[in-house]
Amino acid sequence: MSTQPSQDRIIIFDTTLRDGEQSPGATLNGDEKLTIARQLARLGVDIIEAGFPFASSGDFEAVQKIAQAVGTEAGPVICGLARATRQDIETAAAALKPAVRKRIHTFIATSDIHMEFKLRKTRQEVLAIAEEMVAYAKSFTPDVEFSPEDAGRSDPQFLYAVLERAIAAGATTVNIPDTVGYTTPAEFGGLIRGIKENVPNIDQAIISVHGHNDLGLAVANFLEAVKNGARQLECTINGIGERAGNAALEELVMALHVRRQYFNPFLGRPPESEKPLANIDTRQIYKTSRLVSNLTGMFVQPNKAIVGANAFAHESGIHQDGVLKHKLTYEIMDAQSIGLTDNQIVLGKHSGRNAFRTRLKELGYELLDQDLNRAFLRFKELADKKKEITDWDIEAIVNDETQQAPEHFRLELVQVSSGNHSRPTATVTLRTPDGQELTDAAIGTGPIDAVYKAVNRVVDLPNQLIEFSVQSVTAGIDAIGEVTIRLKQGDRIFSGHAANTDIVVASTHAYLNALNRLYDAALEYDKPLHSQLGEPAVVTASAATKA
Ligand code: KIV
Ligand code: ZN
């Protein structure tokens, strides 16, 4: 795979682990990032922006791990973000070192409002910094991307000048961010056309686009950009990201796939060409979406295009009748093309470890022995309760077992009593970080409320529960329930996720999962954070002394 591909295909640059992780509450630990990076490689993305190494030591280590494990000869390019400063660039270069192909992505704002109020720099100063820092990045790797932040609101003439200088200094990709999600499709397409026509050395670089979804226009903007010469799309799985998120990878890829006859001519191909426009294995889309949703705790809305639960469901009688007579009456794409299989019943009570391992392999999971053992035990427990185990059940178990939130507080027991003539009461026993086993009980408005109150009596980490959702993995009364919660402490949001056939147990695990992340963040308190990433969490003295 070359870092400087030809202009007749679309390069997919995934920033789920960098911009996506900037979603409030989407904080991932290093192992979770690595799990996602491996899946992004299976999906076939060209470039993984693995993080912002200067932002924190956690980010640095995650980028380094991904560079080592995923940035192989056959793997994607691994990219690290860096502000246009020497320290940021050196830190990114150090983190990326193990990758076979590495990219440094450096940026500086070019809109008047950012330069005046945020950077307090003149246009001349920004021009000089861009040139100098691109050249500096180039001294570490031949693959350098430059972004003029807030390009969507920058003066086009100034933008052309900055891009020309950045390319002359060695940028091989120039990325045009609509940082605040302000532009409309016609404007964004026009901006790309203007760059193509007015930057004299633009043929020496790939034009990339990056956009936020504040007005819900990011994907439409990108497709217009493609028509006008953009060849790299920066996107995230499920469209997660800062504020309203980034352009969604699955929407872009499927739009280009389903409408390739429309887009082909813009890439110099005959309309009827069947050659894929991007290198993505679309059958990995659904799995990647669920993995990212589970690990980040960012729930996918049911009506979300491509990956929402209802995206392929036909409710009205007229539609169902039409689809039965001929699929294409109401379906523009096949559910199987995104990897939504028929949810086959694959395993049962008598299936052994080998059958389980084989099915996992077929589903694309290669687990370490210890993870496989834990997942197999969970599978056996489930098979005792549920006659037919489907691929989705298996994925729920694996996602749950491979979630890497540290277990500072561990659930030993949860027990509830509730009913229409009793007060919901819960008892919990937890193992604390110092090895004590503590039990407490509470009464709540419902069984889950009672459990959470009982947990709070043991774990003294003040927080506000802001979101709680239960989703069934498959149909049927014996289905696995997946619980996703988000809680808030100060400005920071922490998510938790767990799956179990008993939703009280799943809810307790999900809550502890989020509390453990909060506790973990408190332990990271002393590590430097870039201002984009918010303030560190506050941990109470009593909780801290329990560590
Ligand atoms: O939105 C933005 O401008 C960014 C840049 C760092 C590319 O994320
Ligand atoms: Zn962004």
Image (cartoon, helix red, strand yellow):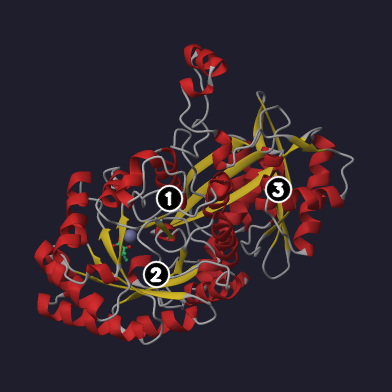
Asked if the residue at tag 2 contacts the one at tag 1, i.e. Cβ–Cβ closer than 8 Å, the answer is no
What residue is pinned by disc 2? 4
What residue is pinned by disc 3? 397
Which residue sits at x=62%, y=52%?
Answer: 455
- Compared to residue 265, the image places residue 201 above or below, namely below
What residue is pinned by disc 1? 277
- Badge 3 crowding class, 10 Å Cα cut-off, few under 14, some 14 to 19, many 20 or more, is many
Q: Amino acid at mark 1?
A: Leu
- Quarter of image, res 128: bottom left
Asked if one can make out residue 493 in the rendered structure from this viewpoint, the answer is yes
x and y, in percent, of residue 63 in the image: 50, 73
Q: Amino acid at mark 2?
A: Gln
Asked if one can make out residue 542 in the rendered structure from this viewpoint, the answer is no
Q: Earlier in the sequence, mark 1 or mark 2?
A: 2
- Compared to residue 385, the image places residue 19 above or below, namely below
Q: Secondary structure at mark 3?
A: helix
Q: Is residue 109 left or right of residue 255?
A: left
